[in-house]
Amino acid sequence: MVSIKEIQKEIWCNKINKGFNTTDVNKEFCLLYGEVAEAYDAYRKKKEDLNEELADIAIYLMGLSEMLGFDLESEILKKVEKNNKRVYKNIDGINIRVGD
């Protein structure tokens, strides 16, 4: 099985090889935002390519992570562990975090 870390590196190499943005972080955030909007639009309109739009979000996120020097796989694992330790209480039908 291929790791997220390996996919992140492959996405970065593709960006370099194809001449895509590798330096403008602000632009990359804007492009990521655009992909999220496209995915939401596909969901809202029940389009068949929602899966591809979600994949685009992941690809842009991994490229941005590489651009910023983050190992996204490691960060996801740390965040999942942190979230698992959080304690929530349901108050009036809404989960409210009450502890870490």
Image: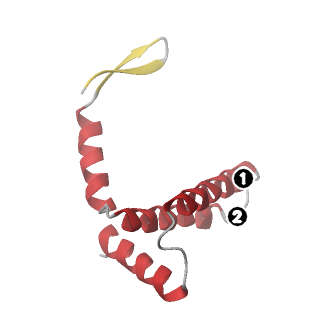
- Examine the rendered structure and indicate whether residue 85 appears above or below residue 68: above
Pointers 2 and 1 in contact (C-beta within 8 Å): no
Indicate the position of residue 37 as horizontal and vertical percent values.
66, 53
Q: Report which quarter residue 11 is drawn in.
A: bottom left
Label 1: how many residues lie within 10 Å, few (<14), some (14-19) or many (20+)?
some
Q: Nearer the viewer, mark 2 or mark 1?
A: 1
Left or right of residue 19, residue 79 in this image:
left
Secondary structure, mark 1, is helix
Residue 95 lies, in percent from the top left, at: 42, 22
Left or right: residue 87 versus residue 56 is: left
Q: Amino acid at mark 2?
A: Glu
Which amino acid does the dot numbered 1 rest on? Asp
Q: Residue furthest right?
A: 45
Residue 70 locus on image (x, y percent)? 31, 61
Identify the residue at horizontal 53%, vertical 74% (top origin). 21
Q: Going 53% across and 66% down the picture, which residue do you hit?
A: 55
Check residue 89 in the rendering and tell me which mark sits there, or answer none: none
Image quadrant containing the C terminus = top left
Q: Position of residue 98 (x, y in %)?
A: 30, 18
Between 32 and 92, the one nearer to me in the picture: 32
User: Local crowd at mark 2 within 10 Å, few (<14), some, or many (≥20)?
Assistant: few
Who comes first in sequence, dot 2 or dot 1?
1
The disc label shown at residue 41, or none: 1
Say how many tags the image has: 2
Q: Secondary structure at mark 2?
A: loop
Distance, label 2 to label 1, CA atoms, is 11 Å
Q: Residue at x 30, y 70 (%)?
A: 5
- Residue marked by disc 2: 48
Specify the quadrant of the image occupied by residue 47. Answer: bottom right
Question: Seen from this angle, which residue lies furthest bottom?
Answer: 17
Quadrant of the snapshot with the N terminus: bottom left
What residue sits 65% from the left and 57% below the top?
Answer: 34
